[in-house]
Image (spheres, helix red, strand yellow):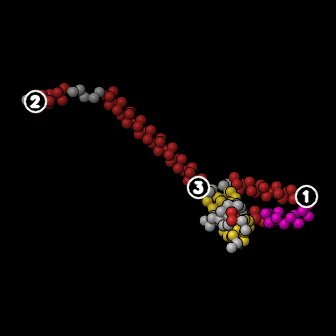
Amino acid sequence: MKDAMEKKNEDLKPEPTELERTRAERDEYLAGWQRAKADAANAEKRMKEDMKRFREVANQGLIEELLPVLQSFELAFANKEAWEKADKGWRTGVEYIYNQIKSVLEQNGLSEVSPLGMPFDPQRDEATAYEEVSDATKDHVVVRVVERGYMLHGRLIRPPKVVVGELKK
């Protein structure tokens, strides 16, 4: 008898109205649209990140090819005798060009690595020589930078060439 009563109660439940079906369908479409919108926004973010990484990798080759140009400028500036003999206006122009190139490279993620006075780090530095020092605080410390190093977007692309202090015994 109980089963018969339950069956009658089920039969008496009203079927969903067209309005309720429409609302349920609307909610389903809305949820799907919101998921699709979120997926599209995430895909756009991923695409922008991928393009940024692609540009960084694509620019790396060009930037690495320009590093010897920077080094040539720096060598010219380091030869004080010859540099001072050059016309002041010409020197100013050359320094301006050097600063322009350096600025463009920095805007594209290049940064100098100059570990002068820092402890020698073989993961970062390339030791070209060791120099005897009498001060114990300069033992295994970079005492001179022979050639600047460079990082691109936080990754070392050219290690600095350095002279490391070595305590004399």
Which SS does the magenta portion mostly show? Answer: helix
Q: Name the element at disc 2.
A: helix
Based on the displayed image, in which of its 4 quarters is residue 19 positioned? top left
Q: Which residue is mark 2?
A: 2
Is residue 126 a member of the stretch shown in magenta?
Answer: no
Based on the displayed image, in which of its 4 quarters is residue 35 positioned? top left
Residue nearest the viewer, comparing 140 with 83: 140
Q: Which mark is residue 70?
A: none
Q: Residue 148: where, in percent of width, then height?
A: 72, 63
Three-letter code for the amino acid on which mark 2 is drawn: Lys
Q: Residues within 10 Å of mark 3 (few under 14, many from 20)?
A: few
- Say which label, 2 or 1, has the lower sequence index: 2
Q: Residue 169: where, in percent of width, then height?
A: 68, 73
State the separation of the CA atoms marked 3 and 1.
42 Å
Q: Residues within 10 Å of mark 1 (few under 14, many from 20)?
A: few
**Residue sitting at 17 percent across and 27 percent down?**
9
Residue 68 appears left or right of 152: right
- Say which label, 2 or 3, has the lower sequence index: 2
Residue 150 appears in the figure: no
Which mark is in front, 3 or 1? 1
- Say which label, 3 or 1, has the lower sequence index: 3
Residue 21 appears left or right of 81: left
Q: Which residue is mark 1?
A: 88
Is 168 drawn above or below residue 19 in the view shown?
Answer: below
Three-letter code for the amino acid on which mark 3 is drawn: Arg
Is 106 drawn above or below residue 161 in the view shown?
Answer: above
Q: Which mark is residue 53?
A: 3
Which mark is in front, 2 or 1? 1
Q: Name the element at disc 3.
A: helix
Q: Please give the range of residues in magenta.
A: 73-89
